[in-house]
Amino acid sequence: MPAYLVTHSETRRGDVLVEDPHLTLTLTDRWAQLSDQDGIVLALPVEQIASITRIDQQDDKPHEE
């Protein structure tokens, strides 16, 4: 499942973890936007963000070849 950790630029208190099976990240020169099939989940001005890291959880099932 897609998951993103958004780290605030000034303090780690504002860090946010967003998870959703249909989550997508869109970046523009001014905004970072996380959306799912229903629309925008979270939108933040890029100057307030230190980093955005995708941290999907590993699938516990073994992969068959």
Image (tube, grey):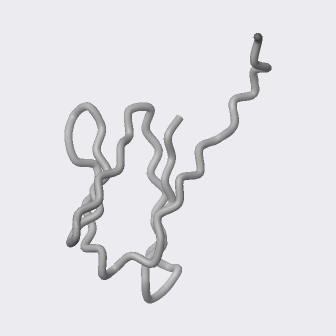
In the orientation shown, which residue stands out farthest toward the bottom? 10
In the image, 36: left or right of 7? left
Q: Residue at x 30, y 38 (%)?
A: 36
Q: Residue at x 29, y 62 (%)?
A: 32
**What is the x, y in percent for residue 57?**
64, 41
**In this picture, is 32 found above or below 3?**
below
* In-front residue for pair 65/55: 65
**In this picture, is 56 found above or below 30?**
above
Q: Residue at x 75, y 21 (%)?
A: 61
Q: In which quadrant of the rendered view does residue 8 lie?
A: bottom left
Q: In which quadrant will I find the C terminus? A: top right
**What is the x, y in percent for residue 58?**
69, 37
Query: In the rendered picture of this protein, how many numbered marks are placed on residues?
Result: 0
In the orientation shown, which residue stands out farthest toward the top? 65
**In this picture, is 36 found above or below 51?**
above
**In this picture, is 55 found above or below 16?**
above
**What is the x, y in percent for residue 27?**
29, 59
**What is the x, y in percent for residue 24?**
35, 43
